[in-house]
Amino acid sequence: MTPPELTFTPSANIAQLKESATIAASQRAKALRAAGRPILDLGAGEPDFDTPPMIRKAAQVAIDSGATRYTATEGILPLRTAIAEQATARRGRGETITAAEVVVSNGSKQSLFNACFALFGPGDEVLIPTPSWTSYYEMVSLSRATPVAVRGDPARGFKVTPADLAAHATARSRGLMLNSPVNPTGSVYSRAELADLIAFARECGIWVISDEIYRRISYVGEAASALDVAESRDHLVVVDGIAKAYAMTGWRIGWSIAPAQLTKAMTAFQSHTTFNPSSVSQAAAVAALTGGAAVDETVTAMVAEFRKRRDAALAILATEPRIRVTPPDGAFYLFLQAPGAGKIPDAGTVFANRLLEEHDVAVVSGSAFQTPDWIRVSYATDLAQVESAMHRIVAAYRSA
Ligand code: GLU
């Protein structure tokens, strides 16, 4: 008997899944560059700096001293302890956050997914301030819950308020994805704004997942953490990692801080999906978190450089007064309204394609963030490229 022909049809789990638009945009730019096109890549959400030398050294020492085997699923104790100690210092209030509340993963993306999968399921709705990072929507959908976009007001840098949340909250609301500084807008929630959103969620019995991966990159003083302002932590998952602050995107280390029972469930889940994150990367992460002043100085220097690029970019964009940009107070993104917004469909994609095809500038269309009239521009690339790209964006805007 001839066996039946097998063709791939996506399972119900991924039937609706779309590839990450942020990753696709940055890989497309890399491929075009490799093929010889002089692309200025402002698509990638990735610091262009090298990992600080003392962190790299710690990884080399770890390899040579045999840290090459499986570790605990939830990560090595010295790393979880360092994370818990930093979180305890930040939290204050006489509360101790312990290593039993921490799961280290292969990047904050995995921690976010662990939390979504452990907390949400069929029938649940999850509020997502919009625009927001492309993967939140997919992670919620993969958890078989329903993502509910809560659009912020562009006049407030798209930041949402408790009233915005209230307008979308239902008896099925089970989660709220927070992120500050925000990818893609660069907006930063003040302590009071963050406190109000978290208090609203607590009143409604909604879990908060606070993605703080850009927290160290702020130009308006220290960006608030949910740990600073949440009245209680019984409904709070804080997610962070080493990628952005320490220029360690490729090392893949992130973590969650969550109530112990949820932490146990996420550990069990991770024990079946990926098990421990890289042992060598964990050693490097310990060096990043415990490196003291030497590491902190390199972080400060990187943030100062991002600020310089941001200011230079804004000065060039200001030469065309019609260009609307949300206040970029943190992260390394500018969020710009595309020409033709409100008049032509998907104006952001049209503009992003034109920038790429006619001006060799790669950016990400706002459609990746559920805001199709805008584009995201990353300035995590050197100053000369940022300036040259901004001149091209102004020229393209004027000729649109
Ligand atoms: N988070 C970055 C971005 O938004 C890196 C790519 C990704 O994971 O989405 O560009």
Image: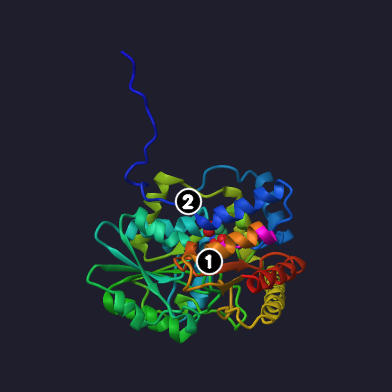
**In the image, is residue 114 part of the stretch drawn in magenta?**
no
Up-down: is 242 above or below 333?
above
Q: Residue 355: image x %, image y %? A: 64, 62
How far is disc 2 from disc 1 in space, using C-alphas?
18 Å
Sequence order check: which comes first, mark 2 or mark 1?
2
Question: Magenta region: which residues?
Answer: 358-365
Please name the residue that numbered disc 2 is placed on.
19
Which residue shows up at 58% across the image and 65% down it? 351
Q: Nearer the viewer, mark 2 or mark 1?
A: 1
What's the amino acid at mark 2? Glu
Is the distance from the Cβ of mark 2 to the nearest ligand 1 atom less than 8 Å? no
Q: Where does residue 107 sit, x and y in percent of width and height?
A: 52, 56
Residue situated in front as seen by the camera: 61 or 34: 34
Residue 161, picture quadrant? bottom left
What is the x, y in percent for residue 137?
Answer: 40, 61
Which residue is denoted by mark 1 in the rendering?
348
380, above or below 280, in the image: below
Q: Secondary structure at mark 1?
A: helix
